[in-house]
Image (spheres, rainbow, N blue to C red):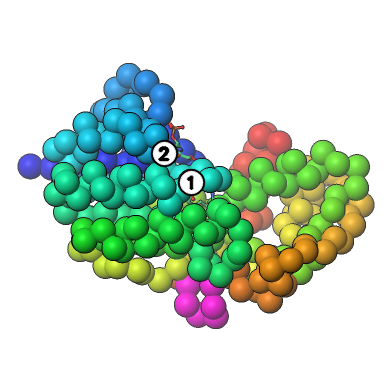
């Protein structure tokens, strides 16, 4: 009998990499989405909303494992508590969660919610695994595209990221999902630590354009954390992916999608 895995967020940037990898490993994959979708490519879509606590029980029926990727700018703690409660009732054997590096250090709402979600998973009483990942290349590309529309680009001074490829995060998550529950596992970050200016210049160079850049200071506690590099995984604590920002840009931007 194959393992049935419910993937929340299976329609998102990360989820779109994860779903076919799970299928390649022989899993039956079910995806929870807020939008009605017909079954396709061997995947059954179940309609539900984690934040509204709707449709979760039917989505879990008959699943052994949950890979929880659904997320948004707000409310991941609340959504995860709803999922965890239903997963406990359903007797789920392994709950796998994707969080973000420095969830416990960056004083911004998104990070606080991810930390709340991590705690809900760890305190669920279910066997669990949580992976914290760095920002995905796709996210940084979205930021770069938005900023590049400005005639002068404000660059947050001292902010560095270690972006990672979503495909590498997906591959790691699939391995973790099929392994025994492992609790909090080492972070996954990309191979380079790059300042915002370097990331933006890389993007502009591939587009063959230039923009003047103006350093700006990020205020408050978040600014202090970023300038101290506390948003990055501590030295040596992270596993690193292989794909660089330049390689990602070469495919995604130079390849036509500007
Ligand atoms: N992006 C990054 O740089 C990054 C870094 C570290 C960790 N993460 C984490 O990785 C996960 C995936 O990120 P992503 O970039 O792939 O996200 P994304 O592309 O924005 O996709 C979000 C996914 O969550 C689902 N979703 C959102 N709200 C939902 C709700 N209330 N109920 C059910 N499903 C809901 C969406 O499904 P429908 O629209 O089909 O309903 C969609 O599949 C998130 O938990 C995020 O916090 C992201």
Q: Confirm whether residue 15 shows in the render.
A: no
Q: Confirm whether residue 181 shows in the render.
A: yes
Q: Is residue 49 above or below residue 211?
A: above
Residue at horizontal 28%, vertical 50%? 84
The quarter of the image holding the N terminus is top left
Q: Which residues are magenta?
A: 233-238
Give the spatial CA distance, label 2 vs label 1. Answer: 7 Å
Instruction: Out of 208 and 94, give the one closest to the viewer.
Output: 94
> Is label 1 within 8 A of ligand 1 (CB to nearest ligand atom)?
yes
**Residue 155 at x, y percent in the picture:** 81, 57
**Residue 256 at x, y percent in the picture:** 67, 34
Instruction: Out of 72 and 23, give the one closest to the viewer.
Output: 72
Question: Are the residues at dot 2 and dot 1 in contact (C-beta closer than 8 Å)?
Answer: yes
Residue at horizontal 82%, vertical 64%? 217
**Residue 47 at x, y percent in the picture:** 33, 26
The quarter of the image holding the C terminus is top right
Q: Quadrant of residue 49?
A: top left
Instruction: Report which residue position mark 1 lands on.
Output: 75
Q: Residues within 10 Å of mark 1 (few under 14, many from 20)?
A: some
Q: In the image as oriented, which residue stretches furthest toward the left?
A: 1
């Amino acid at each position: 009998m194959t393992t049935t895995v419910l993937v929340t967020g299976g329609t998102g940037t990360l989820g779109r990499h994860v779903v076919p990898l799970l299928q390649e490993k022989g899993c039956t994959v079910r995806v929870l989405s807020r939008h009605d979708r017909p079954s396709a490519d061997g995947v059954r879509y179940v309609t539900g909303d984690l934040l509204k606590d709707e449709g979760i029980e039917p989505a879990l029926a008959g699943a052994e494992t949950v890979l929880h990727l659904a997320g948004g700018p707000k409310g991941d703690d609340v959504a995860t508590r709803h999922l965890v409660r239903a997963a406990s009732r359903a007797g789920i054997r392994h709950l796998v969660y994707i969080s973000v590096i420095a969830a416990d250090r960056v004083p911004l709402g998104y990070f606080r919610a991810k930390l709340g979600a991590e705690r809900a998973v760890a305190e669920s009483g279910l066997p669990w695994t949580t992976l914290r990942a760095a920002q995905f290349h796709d996210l940084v590309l979205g930021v770069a595209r938005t900023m590049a529309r400005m005639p002068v680009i404000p660059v947050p001074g001292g902010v560095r990221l270690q972006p990672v490829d979503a495909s590498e995060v997906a591959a790691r998550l699939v391995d973790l999902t099929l392994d025994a529950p492992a609790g909090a596992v080492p972070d996954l970050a990309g191979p380079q630590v790059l300042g915002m200016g370097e990331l933006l210049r890389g993007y502009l160079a591939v587009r063959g354009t230039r923009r003047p850049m103006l350093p700006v200071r990020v205020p408050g506690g978040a600014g202090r954390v970023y300038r101290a590099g506390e948003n990055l995984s501590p030295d040596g604590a992270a596993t690193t992916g292989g794909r660089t920002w330049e390689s990602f840009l070469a495919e995604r931007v130079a390849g036509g999608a500007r």
